[in-house]
Amino acid sequence: MERFNPTATLLQSAANVLFAPRRPLHPWVTTLWMVSVLACTTEPLDLPTTGPSITTSALQPARAGQDYIESLSLEGGQAPYTWELVDPGPFKDWLKLGIGQLMGKPTAQTDEAPITILVRDAAQQSGTKQFLLSVGPCPDGLKRDCAVSVDGACKIGKEICHEGDFGACTDLVEPSSSLEACGPSCTICQPGGDRCLGGKCYCGVGGDPCPEGTSCCNDPSRDSKTGKRCADIQTDPDACGGCNPCRTDLKNVVRTCEVGKCVYPCAAGYKNCSSDPSDQNCVTHVAEDTQNCGSCGNVCGALGSAQNAVASCVGGRCQPRCASDYASCGVSYALGCPFNLKTDAKRCGACDNDCTARPNVAVAACENGGCRILACVPGFGDCDGNPSNGCEATLGQLPNCGFCGNTCQGLSDPGFGVAGVVCQNFSCGIGQCVAGRSDCNLNVEDGCETPLNTNSHCGRCGNACTGTNGLGIPYLCNTQLGRCCLAGGSSGCQ
């Protein structure tokens, strides 16, 4: 036996303006049927875990020209429910689906064909069912309104059913300007217009009819009685699914319209963690809530003095809130903040500031959040006193020969006779002596100590002028030639 759930089904109907598809008539319908049934119960609500299921077994056939109303029943799921006519088949021009009720007025006979209906509950569980529907012939003698364009004017009349089909539009009279038959061609203004003036459809004050795919709806920024605008009822949250505004009273949601249905996804950083399926508010700030961090029920574990931190949620992720001077530097949440930025040489003042990773640094320390170089690798020195570039100076060349600032300037004193200095093996050396002197003892400390104009060092180190020739004339140093010559002259030189 079918069971009707009164908490799930509210019967409603809508006005349907339908037209007979006859040659070359333009139909016009003025009759509105409104049916509203509210079922209520005092029984406690069940909260089933299974999804909703449509229990109606079959649909009654419709008849052309007559109003069709068919109620649907369901079981299971959680109220409230939403209904959707997923596939209306060949009946799309007239068949509508309200809350648990099919309705409309078919205009012509139609062979039996399938339609598909979907119902979704508050927990977003859904069920679908396919039915077969047909439209039978109209009953003989049934009259309906019609409209037809004659000689450049739209006239209204009546169609009479004979042998299951409607005849021509007869008993024509001049119509008043109406939304259902506007102007010489009997134009249907709705849903793109809200008025027919001077034989033309308009939307809003002075507005043309709305473009195809949009409807003439109330403008929320103006008086709803006079302010109209063209709206896309598939995407506009102020006119969703048929000029219906989506709710504005929900907290922390993005008010949107998707394919003609109001949806309320949570705003960034918020989620709906309520256990009540009918609650659509998003009041849980998962971007900062330590009990619901990033997702409902994700609790950030407690941290304390041993981890130098307390629990916190930042951007939807559990992160420790560090005590002063401490940092986590990307370690696991459970470790808290193990690094002291004032004393940790590898994380000095900041997680990415490694004092030991500077160029040519052998030993470094962190003092009050600042790097200090204690030792450089051999051959290098921190000569500029700037720890950020490490031990930047090479000590095997001037001006830092062996140690910072050693320019070997002492060898350049006039008394040393040195014309140029060099740095060799991290020590100062003589690169060039002044003219007439040389470093004959190879002792850099006394510079170019030897004059080269003596009989002991004539022109070069160790070139001694000794002895005499056969006449007893001694060899002496010729300082101009730098050679040993007889009596120091310019002849008899060796």
Image (cartoon, rainbow, N blue to C red):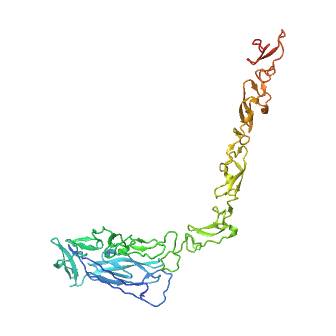
Residue 118 % position (x, y): 41, 77
Find residue 80 and report its image quarter.
bottom left
Residue 321 % position (x, y): 63, 67
Location of the C terminus (image quadrant): top right
Residue 99 % position (x, y): 38, 81
Q: Residue furthest bottom?
A: 42
Side of 209 where 312 appears, left or right: right
Location of the N terminus (image quadrant): bottom left
Residue at point 59% right, 74% down? Answer: 291
Residue 132 appears in the figure: yes
431 and 109: which is toward the camera: 431
Residue at point 53% right, 74% down? Answer: 284
Side of 60 where 365 appears, left or right: right
118 and 389: which is toward the camera: 389
Residue 215 appears in the figure: no
85 and 18: which is toward the camera: 18
